[in-house]
C-alpha cells in the first residue's frame, strides 16, 4: 500500500496530466506523445519514491 506522500504525488501527477492533455483532446498524435511523456515522468516519480524509502 503506498504511503500518503506517494499517493499525493500520484494524484498531483494525474491532475497535471489532465491539464496538460486537455488542450490536445482533438489532436491524437500530440495526445499520445503527451501521455507517453507522462508515463515516463510517473515512472521516474515512483522510482525516486522507492529509492527514498530504502
Image (cartoon, rainbow, N blue to C red):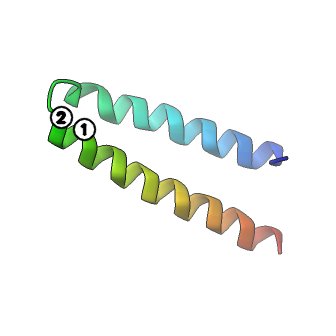
Image quarter (top left, top right, bottom left or bottom right) of the C terminus:
bottom right
What residue do we see at 72% from left, 73% from top?
51
Q: Secondary structure at mark 2?
A: helix
> Residue 34 appears in which quarter of the rendering?
top left
Looking at the image, is 16 positioned above or below residue 36?
A: above
What residue do we see at 21% from left, 30% from top?
24
Which residue has dot 1 on it? 31
Looking at the image, is 5 positioned above or below residue 48?
A: above
The front one of 16 and 30 is 30
For label 2, count other residues whose C-alpha is less than 10 Å away and answer few (under 14), some (14-19) or many (20+). few
Is residue 27 rendered to the left or right of residue 5? left
Q: Secondary structure at mark 1?
A: helix
> Residue 9 appears in which quarter of the rendering?
top right
Is the residue under label 1 in contact with that under label 2 (CB below 8 Å)?
Answer: yes
Is residue 37 rendered to the left or right of residue 40? left
Q: Position of residue 40 (x, y in %)?
A: 44, 59
What residue do we see at 53% from left, 42% from top?
13
For label 1, count other residues whose C-alpha is less than 10 Å away and answer few (under 14), some (14-19) or many (20+). some
Looking at the image, is 27 positioned above or below residue 6?
A: above
Is residue 4 rendered to the left or right of residue 24? right
Which residue has dot 2 on it? 28
Q: Position of residue 1 (x, y in %)?
A: 85, 47
What residue do we see at 76% from left, 47% from top?
5
Cα distance between the residues tagged 2 and 1 = 5 Å
Q: How many marks?
A: 2
Q: Position of residue 2 (x, y in %)?
A: 80, 48
Is residue 45 rendered to the left or right of residue 1? left
Amino acid at each position: 500500500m503506498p504511503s500518503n506522500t506517494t499517493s499525493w504525488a500520484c494524484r498531483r501527477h494525474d491532475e497535471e496530466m489532465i491539464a496538460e492533455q486537455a488542450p490536445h483532446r482533438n489532436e491524437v498524435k500530440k495526445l499520445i506523445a503527451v501521455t507517453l511523456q507522462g508515463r515516463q515522468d510517473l515512472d521516474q516519480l515512483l522510482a525516486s519514491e522507492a529509492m527514498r524509502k530504502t
